[in-house]
Amino acid sequence: MKVTHYLLGYDNLKIIQDPDMFNFSIDSVLLPNFATINTKTKKILDIGCGNAPIPLILSQKTNAQIIGVEIQKEVSEMARESVKINNLENQIEIINDDILKLKDKLETDSFDLITCNPPYFKVKDTSKFNKNDYKTIARHEVTLNLEQVLKIAKKLLKNDASITLVHRPERLVDIITLMRQNNLEPKKLRFVYPKKGQNANVILIEGTKNGKPGLKILEPLYIQDENGNYDKEITRR
């Protein structure tokens, strides 16, 4: 059953969701606010855009053209609805396709920024999948894995352009290793914690194509205070 909500921290942005599929998470709010955007940013690709939370938020930060790619047809249709109800059809294009196939149709070295909230979990013999395919694809590396995402970034990013990822701390070594294997130099990293006193459960990381070495670690972000209220950086209030 489809419902309409406001994006967290954005009372001017509505998003279409279906609890039976996969609702946007706070990770999708953190990522576009972490991405480096400037006047040179003219073309953005969001890989695995879901119902389009990241493209919607990015549209508030730049006039760049934004392409969101989503492999699941029903989810991509929700993304298009979300774009339409916000009157952003002229800025955001949603493509229902497999990025592994689409990448060969997109122009090499053409994007100024790639964002991705990828599946977090490797597929193992012991992996326990949700029976709901929508959630399995979103959470596990079934149709797209980390190495493939970074290879795509290497192909499609302009020189000195960046890919920004939100992921899990336990995959940090994998991310840095695979970034460097694909000429993507890690440049910016932030650890995100549920609350003070707890372990980080999210990382935000940016890698620049053919960038110079030099990793900047930003101050930690705590999602909630001791009373369970969202940090002002999350709610933008």
Image: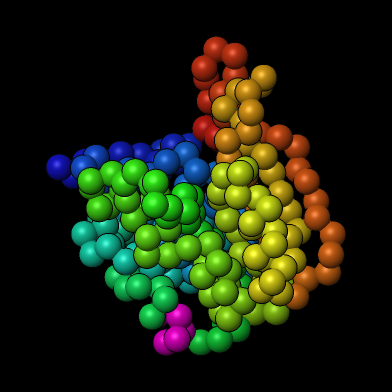
Which residue in the rendered view is the most extreme toward the top?
227
What residue is rendered at 52% in x and 32% in y? 235
User: Which quadrant would the N terminus be assigned to in this image?
Assistant: top left
In the rendered structure, does residue 120 fall within the stretch colored magenta? Answer: no
Q: Tell me residue 6's x, y (percent).
A: 35, 39
What residue is rendered at 52% in x and 17% in y? 228
What residue is rendered at 72% in x and 68% in y? 180
Span highlighted in magenta in the image: 102-106
| Display coloring | rainbow
On the question of residue 18 being in view, the answer is: no
Tell which of 169 and 209 is nearer to you.
169
Q: How many marks?
A: 0
The vertical placement of 72 against 225, above or below, is below
Q: Quadrant of residue 83?
A: bottom left
On the question of residue 145 being in view, the answer is: yes
Q: Quadrant of residue 81?
A: bottom left
What residue is rendered at 67% in x and 19% in y? 197
Q: Tell me residue 30's x, y (percent).
A: 55, 44
Q: Tell me residue 101's x, y (percent).
A: 38, 80
Q: Is residue 138 left or right of residue 188?
A: left
The vertical placement of 171 against 151, above or below, is above
In the rendered structure, does residue 104 fall within the stretch colored magenta? Answer: yes
Q: Tell me residue 162's x, y (percent).
A: 65, 67
User: Which quadrant would the C terminus be assigned to in this image?
Assistant: top right
Magenta span: helix, strand or loop, mainly? loop
The vertical placement of 59 against 209, above or below, is above
Which residue in the rendered view is the most extreme toward the front?
125
Tell which of 60 and 68 is nearer to you.
68
